[in-house]
Image (cartoon, rainbow, N blue to C red):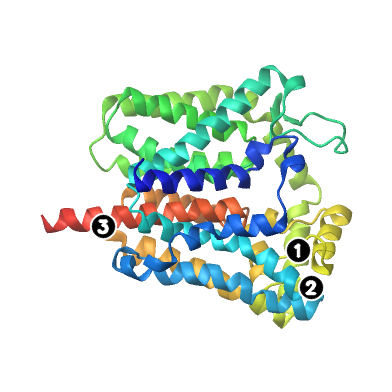
Amino acid sequence: MKKNSKALLVLGIIWLYLSNFFGYNKFSQIRVSYAIECLLYSIPLLMSYKNINRHRTTMCFHNEIILLIVLPLISGISAIIEFNQSLYQTLVAWVPSLLWATYYLLHTYKVPYSKALKFLLLFTFIGVAIMTVQQFIPNQAIFGVLGVNEYDKIAEVRNGLYRFRIGGAACAGIFLFTFYFNKLIKEYKRIQIIISIILILYIYLTLTRQTILTALIVIVSTYIVSSKKNISLQSVLLVFIFISVFYFYGEQLFNSFIDKTIEQTSGEDIRLVEYEYFSNEIFTNPMIFIFGTGIPHASSPLGAYYKSLEDNYSLFTSDIGIIGTWFNYGIIYIILFLWITYKVIIKMRKYIPTYIQIYYFSVIIILPLAFPWGTSISNMLWAFILYIIDCEIINNKKNKLL
């Protein structure tokens, strides 16, 4: 087995664990101790730290990754001072941030970017297979089902479909769809249309409004950008089919999403309440403004504070995108995100392929609703994405020299 394949195997094991084995309903019975979890999260850094500087010339985000690892730890200052979270609890809560070192691991083992894409595609395909099969046998579902104390339901039902929370980041599907749909628009191939349809199915089965909205933004943006270039007749017909499906079957496909939106706009949208509450906390508390609250440990006073907000008031920082992340990690973390975005879409734009630009555009549009980083698995995913961007930049620089 090649070294880069071994690296991906290790990362695959970590990914499986982070996704709770795709939301396996008995995962809590096999969950390991905090000590082993911390070791698991540290593996990418332990496997790469000796070679980080050796590959620095090919890393466009070398320093930024260091900051993405360190800043959540610095946010712990607020957790300790403002919320009496212990140093030990703060460190344990911070350790998953080490998963950003996946970026260094991919560089250290020189994983081909095609393999990195296939890695993400594999887990996405497994996810869509699970969600699809369980739609037909919901009473036997074992992945992504609700707990026995959560309304005694198998899963939430939207648009007549079960919403199985299988774990993993939905944005992996969005990133992959952007890549393959962009290729499909440029050149019609059977394999690309099959993959694109599977990815659309995955995105829809998440039954999440912002995820589906992001996919629609990608479709429209890709077609607008590509219309200025040469595109195949088959690709034009494919986009026409997509639009026709949304036009004629939009009500059936998105009925519950539309009803939910109407319900929220006609009443008091909980997101507006969340924006008001968390914005007020940010701008009236200098510590939270700069550092955020820090990452909460479940058994700490800070963890109890978050749980109280969620259970008693239905206030979730994850619902309000960039504001929620600001509340969690502080203004410096937000500035870092904006800096990386600037590097990708402006500073290095002549080396950045169209699909990356479109993906970033969709991420920016959806920022008020969802922030791309924050959870363990989304951090790991974005380490992959930034690595793939590096590979694209290197390849494009070489092509310009030829």
Front: mark 3 or 2: 2
Q: Is residue 250 visible?
A: no
Mark 3 highlights which residue?
394
- Secondary element at tag 3: helix
Mark 2 highlights which residue?
85
User: Residue type at mark 1?
Assistant: His
Instruction: Specify the quadrant of the image occupied by residue 25.
Output: top right
Would you say the residues marked 3 and 2 are in contact, meaning their CB atoms lie under 8 Å apart? no
Q: CA distance from mark 3 to mark 1?
A: 40 Å
Residue at the outermost left position = 402
Residue 344 x/y as whole percent: 38, 61
Q: CA distance from mark 1 to mark 2?
A: 8 Å
In the image, residue 195 above or below residue 370: above
Residue displayed at 52% across by 35% down: 124
Mark 1 highlights which residue?
297
Is 301 displayed left or right of 41 in the figure?
right
Dot 1 crowding, Cα within 10 Å, few <14, some 14–19, many 20+ = many
Is 63 displayed left or right of 317 in the figure?
left
Residue displayed at 71% across by 81% down: 287
Dot 2 crowding, Cα within 10 Å, few <14, some 14–19, many 20+ = many
Q: CA distance from mark 3 to mark 2?
A: 44 Å
Q: Is residue 71 visible?
A: yes
Front: mark 3 or 1: 1
User: Residue type at mark 2?
Assistant: Gln
Would you say the residues marked 1 and 2 are in contact, meaning their CB atoms lie under 8 Å apart? yes
- Secondary element at tag 1: loop
Residue 360 x/y as whole percent: 44, 54
Viewer-closest of 222 and 156: 156
The numbered mark, 3 or 2, whose residue comes first in the sequence reads: 2
Assign the C terminus to one quadrant of the image: bottom left
The numbered mark, 3 or 1, whose residue comes first in the sequence reads: 1
